[in-house]
Image (cartoon, rainbow, N blue to C red):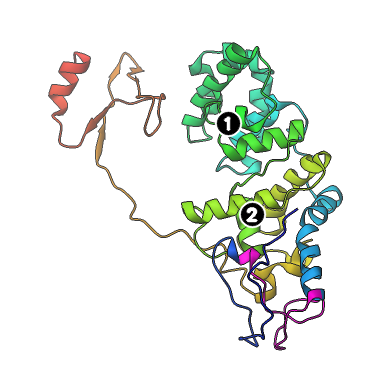
Amino acid sequence: MWTPCWTNWRPRACTSPSRPPTPSGAAAAATLPTRTASCGKWPGTQAAIWTPTAISCWKKRLSSFAERLVRWQRAHGRHDLPWQCDDPYRVWLSEIMLQQTQVATVIPYYQRFTESFPAVTALAAAPLDDVLSHWAGLGYYSRARNLHKAAQMVVERFGGRFPRDAATLAELPGVGRSTAAAIAGFCFAERTAILDGNVKRVLTRWAGIEGFPGEKRIETQLWDLASKLLPAQAADMPAYTQGMMDLGATLCTRSKPDCAACPLRDDCRAHIEGRQSELPTRKPRKAIPERDTVMLLIEHDGRVLLQQRPPVGIWGGLWCLPELAHGQDVSAACHDQFGV
């Protein structure tokens, strides 16, 4: 249960009759919002003082976060996704595929993968080129290479059985803290928080946290908040974890969130203040890098020469047309590298 620290709190009158103060970071969730003394929503126009009754009521709202989310997920969440099971191999596979990729795109790839590699032992034994060919079109090919390495690690180090705790799962190549927590929460009911893009959006809006969620300082505060909102009962972890994902994917969307159907709307700062479009804070824009390159099309007897790219960088490990740096002597390169 998350219980904010009230050590330095003193009753005070509202300084803003129209909108509560908006601190940044985790303090946004722990700071008492300016509101009426009764257990209602934050005021639109009325100034008031915090009372012990109001404080007690606010604590109850915070502690009921997980309860409301679990209840909503069981009644209204997604229950028909093909990887919704307690098999850590299938959950792990889906979590890796879903990184920066939409559910609708992932489903056919997931189905082909599980048909060709029905168990982690089959994936570990497969040639990397076979794995990459199944991945073709999903992008971010380092995920496929790490998937193959992780499968081999599970077989060689853990005897083909996935670790049951998030800390050990995070040792697998390509498995970060949030992915490890998702596997542990879904399959082993471990009480550990996830923090993917959808969850960041839910928490920044609910707590009114300002600042780009990808910034290390803000992300650290979000991890702290996410860890304090977990359900008390481990048995609720699968529904809670799925609920956090579902809420961000179906209701608390980037644009046009469906706040009327949200189980957290009554104490969501973004909803109460009408700031859904402002939160989360957008990522600062960076200049898009440009690179000039030359691709060689070398054909002989109807066959085209392909070259395997380095394992790191764009299209890592894939077979492509040979590439030369812009300005490099094409004739000399063809003669020296390919004998043509």
Q: Is residue 19 left or right of residue 231?
A: left
Q: Nearer the viewer, residue 48 or 189?
A: 48
Q: Helix, strand or loop at disc 1? A: loop
The mark lying in front, picked from 2 and 1, is: 2
Q: Which residue is mark 1?
A: 170
Q: Amino acid at mark 2?
A: Leu
Please name whichever residue, 166 or 116, is drawn nearer the observer in this view of the structure: 166
> Is residue 4 inside the magenta stretch?
no
Q: CA distance from mark 2 to mark 1?
A: 20 Å
- The prevailing secondary structure element of the residues shown in magenta is loop
Q: Is residue 313 left or right of residue 235?
A: left
- Position of residue 303 measured from the top left corner of the image (x, y, whole percent): 35, 16
- Residue 166 is situated, as x and y percent measured from the top left of the image, at 64, 32
86 or 37, nearer to the observer: 37
Which stretch did the figure color magenta?
28-52
Q: Residue at x 57, y 40 (%)?
A: 99
Does the magenta segment cover residue 41? Answer: yes
